Image (cartoon, rainbow, N blue to C red):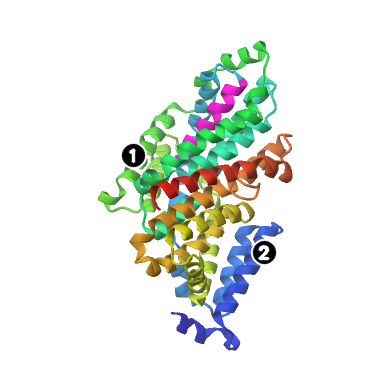
Amino acid sequence: MGGHAASSVYFGLNPMWVSTCLLAITYAVIISEKINRAVIALVGAGVMVLVGVLSQEEAIKGIDWNTIGLLTGMMILVSVSRRSGMFQYVAVWSAKAAKAHPAGILLLLQITTAVLSAFLDNVTTVLLMVPVTLAITKQLDVPAYPYLFAEIFASNIGGTATLIGDPPNILIGSQVGLDFNAFVIHLAPVIVVVLVVQTIMIHLVWGKDLKATPEREARIMAMREQDTIEDWLLLKQSIVVLTLVMIAFVLARPLHLEPATIAMFGAAVLMLLDNWSHHAEKASENIHRTFGDVEWITIFFFIGLFIVVHGVEVGGLLKLLADQLVAATGGNMAHAGYAILWASAVLSAIVDNIPFVATMIPLIKSMAPAYGGPDNILPLWWCLSLGACLGGNGTLIGASANLTVAGLAERSGVPFRFLTYTYYAFPMMLVSIAICHVYVWWRYF
């Protein structure tokens, strides 16, 4: 494949250098945030084909349609079920379960966010949680920042526990062939520990000092969860479809189904049921709204990125780097695992963890022969997932959910400064990676 690519690059340039320069430029512009990242990824992908690093057929082979389908399907499922008011119900219920004590609400909102994030993607979870959190903190007259900060952390921690919780995991699962159960078995145990330590740290930094007057607490206790439900029929339909989708994820192997098929079919069925129960004119409006809710920027960003990374893979850079990493760790897989865990964490805090993981997957695959085949390098995938997903907590640009919360907060008059966030977040992120280091050492090495 490399030889075929080499012959077709214009001016006889080395395809490895051409593809590497394109990747570097694409990354630099994405990090600068001057131009929308989806546009940059698509331009980078187009240039890869135009200069001859990839043919169009080869470029399309580089796109992981399983990831695209899974992401789109889950976005549609959440868009439809959100209209029922289901998620707002959960948030109000959490606040009342904590007897409206600010520190208790801080704890329960973190747990709620983490659990939701394990089954919905992180951006969706924070989009659902933040408006309710802002309403609750306003009623209690307590600062919103600690709650929003805690929800960013909880969403990235909870999302790490499952195949569908965080885009890096969707990428790893899809391209390596790991199913829903594998992620739960290997990652959920350490994620529970990380979440417990996290909630304790956040309580010590902010929670213990949060106080509200008895009158304010009474207002929260007077809220009725039932009032948040806007469509009872849609609520029942959503719960049934979402439950069946989760069961199908767990049974995907014996059913011989890919996650994308399950998510897209579930999305189609829920849209059908929603259409059925509304009159024609409302049905059409709902469909437009649902497709409008899909984050097309994210979807097209993935498509462009897959092609750019595939160009680099075909160019031969990733094999070269993999050989270097194996040599640097002396062929010791535990050392390679620790290097991947820590490097992923620090780099994912600086660059968005999605393009980082997209680049690392083929790199780690290239290391398999040195360690005796693909089955032997499973621990390296768990190191990559833990490092990239949890490392995303380190700065505001580390993960999409962080920027989403910051955007919603600023719009509501809660300032979210890059340096303030990093000052608290980076040390906390390093603690969670240290816990993961102990875990992978104990369990795999």
Question: Residue 147 location, x and y as percent?
Answer: 63, 31
Question: Residue 407 location, x and y as percent?
Answer: 67, 42
Image quadrant in which you'd find residue 161: top left
Q: Is residue 45 magenta?
A: no
Q: Residue at x 53, y 29 (%)?
A: 88
**394 sits left or right of 278 in the view:** right
Q: Which mark is residue 223?
A: none
| Above or below, comparing residue 98 to residue 432 in the picture | above
| Above or below, comparing residue 379 to residue 130 in the picture | below
Q: Which residue lies under the disc numbered 1?
A: 244
Q: Residue furthest left?
A: 254
**Viewer-nearest residue: 277 or 443:** 443
**Viewer-nearest residue: 397 or 44:** 397
Q: CA distance from mark 1 to mark 2?
A: 42 Å
Q: Earlier in the sequence, mark 1 or mark 2?
A: 2
Image quadrant in which you'd find residue 65: bottom left
Question: Residue 409 location, x and y as percent?
Answer: 68, 37
Question: Residue 16 location, x and y as percent?
Answer: 55, 78
Q: Which mark is residue 28?
A: 2
The region drawn magenta spans: 102-118
The type of residue carrying mark 2 is Ala
